[in-house]
Image (cartoon, rainbow, N blue to C red):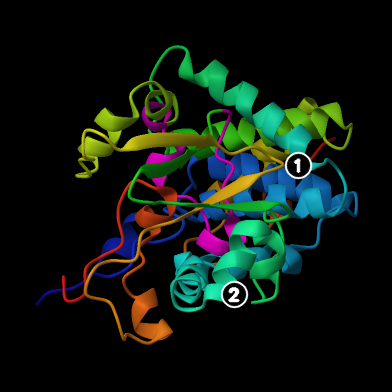
Amino acid sequence: MSAPEPVFEAPWHAQAFALAVHLNAEGVFDWREWTQCFGAVLQEHGVSRELNGGDDYFLAWITALERICAQKQVADAGALAELKAGWERAYLATPHGHPVHLNAGEVKVG
Amino acid sequence: MPHDHHDHDHPHTLLPPDPALRVKALETLLERKGLLDPAALDEIIETYANKIGPQNGAAVVARAWADEDFHRALLTDATAAVSEMGFYGRQGEHMVAVENTDDTHNVVVCTLCSCYPWPLLGIPPGWYKSDAYRARVVREPRKVLAEFGLTLPEGKKVRVWDSTAEIRYLVVPQRPAGSEGLSQEDLAKLVTRESMIGTGLAKEQGA
């Protein structure tokens, strides 16, 4: 018997998936709104190239999450970009093998 | 002397891929706003990675094959019938079972995105989510099924069901010949994920 294929191919696929399920359960959006938003993003992404249902699919999933969170005014694009840059700095500033904390990437102002 | 010096090549922690950082940023922001409980996220992942999968749907199909009352209940109101077996929850609010017969083969798609009966089948496989499958199975189902290795007899009708956020379909495959007398547990082993989406058939005993 062959080993079962993994349900999620990458940890971030699982994280993104769970985030949508959780926000739906918390009432941030209903599932119909989600499928419409996600369906629209898939269509936009599919215009220029054929999506393969793997990384492509979850990239569209994340774009849809960012979009619906902006629409619902729970996360704006500027704040997300800042946090992403902060995490990037935190990873680069943390020695290998140590847990990464966001404050390791804080920009010291003044 | 062989040494693994891999770690020493990276003085700092490896940067995760860009989309992983976007997810982290979202998580951080939502957590700060009190909209996110990281433990709840872990629980969702754990559930979908390990507890929910096609084995649930297979148990339902095997029971329908073996138990005429359940079979009738499943085709009448699938949501109620499978809920009674404990298979309900997110994305399974309204499930409909469609049965393959000698005359008709059923196959399921979601042309909008990837709606799927999670409580019964878990997370959809990559091909179910691909543009190629979503666009083509509606247009040329026989050809797509043939690419899955499933060639249907000329006279057999193919029905394609488009899942939505409201309705998710489960295909009940035909019970394979030679499976008489098997226990429900052994019957369930013949029921593949593909057979419950309609891109395959149930396995023959010993195949």
Residue B79 at x, y percent in the picture: 69, 60
Label 2 close to label 1 by CB (< 8 Å): no
For the C terminus of chain B, give its image quadrant: bottom left
User: Taking B163 as reference, is B200 above or below it?
Assistant: below
Q: Is residue B96 magenta?
A: no
Task: From the image, tell me which residue sits under label 1.
Answer: A31
Name the chain under label 1: A
Q: Quadrant of residue B149?
A: top left
Residue under disc 2 on the same chain as residue under disc 1: no
Crowd around label 1: few <14 · some 14–19 · many ≥20 (10 Å): some
Please report the residue visible at 66 percent of the width from the left and 48 percent of the height from the top: B24
Please report the residue visible at 45 percent of the width from the left and 78 percent of the height from the top: B66
Q: Nearer the viewer, residue B155 or B167?
A: B155
Q: Would residue B85 be found to the left or right of residue B125 on screen?
A: right
Please report the residue visible at 38 percent of the width from the left and 33 percent of the height from the top: A52
Q: Which of B203 and B152 is in front in this view?
A: B152
SS class, disc 2:
helix
**How many numbered badges does the structure rendering display?**
2
Q: Would residue B88 be found to the left or right of residue B185 on screen?
A: right
Name the chain under label 2: B
SS class, disc 1:
helix
Crowd around label 2: few <14 · some 14–19 · many ≥20 (10 Å): few
What is the three-letter code of the residue carrying label 2? Asp
Task: From the image, tell me which residue sits under label 2.
Answer: B69
